[in-house]
Amino acid sequence: MTPFAATLPTAQFLLELRQKHHPTPERWAALEADLALAPGRRTRPVAVIDTNVLLDFWFWEDKTAAPVKDALYYDRFWAVRSDDTVDELADVIRRPQFELTVANQCEILRLWHSLSFGITIPADFTTTLRCKDRDDVKFLRLADFVKADFVVTKDKAVLKAGKRAKRNGTVVLTPAAAGTIL
């Protein structure tokens, strides 16, 4: 956990989630088997979901993102997360404009942990994927590390990085486009 993330109101809860919440060995084995395959050859696609789309699921309840949320709940794809991407989610949902209690913030984090797989990216892993917004590189780095089939985002800078990501086998999609595929 970064020093900044340690100051968040949900920091202790996040530490507990990271230590205690783990998918069953069978689910891990299935994900690892799929990760060993090239994108497009997997039993289920692997996707990175940007913070703004997660907010659409559990805060805004945006109908455009509903098909992706349904696909997530029905286990039609592997959703992956890293500590960096979760720390960003925790930072965003604590902002005053969302007016979420710490308990509500913890529930969103618990939901995301229960529906996704935590991936540890080695510190020395570098990605060739770039984005104008440095804060969004974490999503592209995760996608590059796992060779994700998709990144689902509404962020214009991440969508623009999609051309380079596609060369690596990852398609960057809006929630509306992803909803037709997943």
Image (cartoon, rainbow, N blue to C red):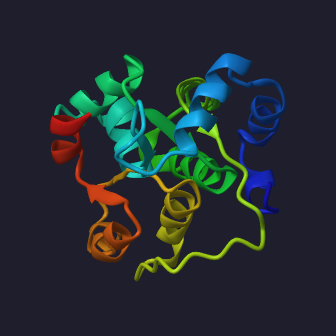
Residue 70 placement, left or right of 13: left
Tell me which residue sits at (42%, 78%) in the image. 131
- Towards the viewer: 58 or 45: 45
Is residue 97 placed above or below 77 in the rendered structure?
Answer: below
Q: Answer whether residue 64 is visible to the viewer in this image.
A: no
Asked which quadrant contains residue 171, the reply is bottom left
Residue 107, percent from left and from top: 58, 24
Residue 30 placement, left or right of 52: right
Q: Answer whether residue 102 is visible to the viewer in this image.
A: yes
Is residue 120 placed above or below 9 in the rendered structure?
Answer: below
Asked which quadrant contains residue 59, the reply is top left
Tell me which residue sits at (48%, 37%) in the image. 79
Asked which quadrant contains residue 172, the reply is bottom left
Residue 58, percent from left and from top: 39, 30
- Towards the viewer: 10 or 95: 10
Residue 144, percent from left and from top: 52, 63
Residue 152 placement, left or right of 135: left
Tell me which residue sits at (40%, 32%) in the image. 44
Q: Quadrant of the N terminus?
A: bottom right
Task: State the count of labels.
Answer: 0
Tell me which residue sits at (27%, 74%) in the image. 163
- Towards the viewer: 33 or 160: 33
Residue 88, percent from left and from top: 58, 55
Q: Quadrant of the C terminus?
A: top left
Is residue 171 placed above or below 35 in the rendered structure?
Answer: below
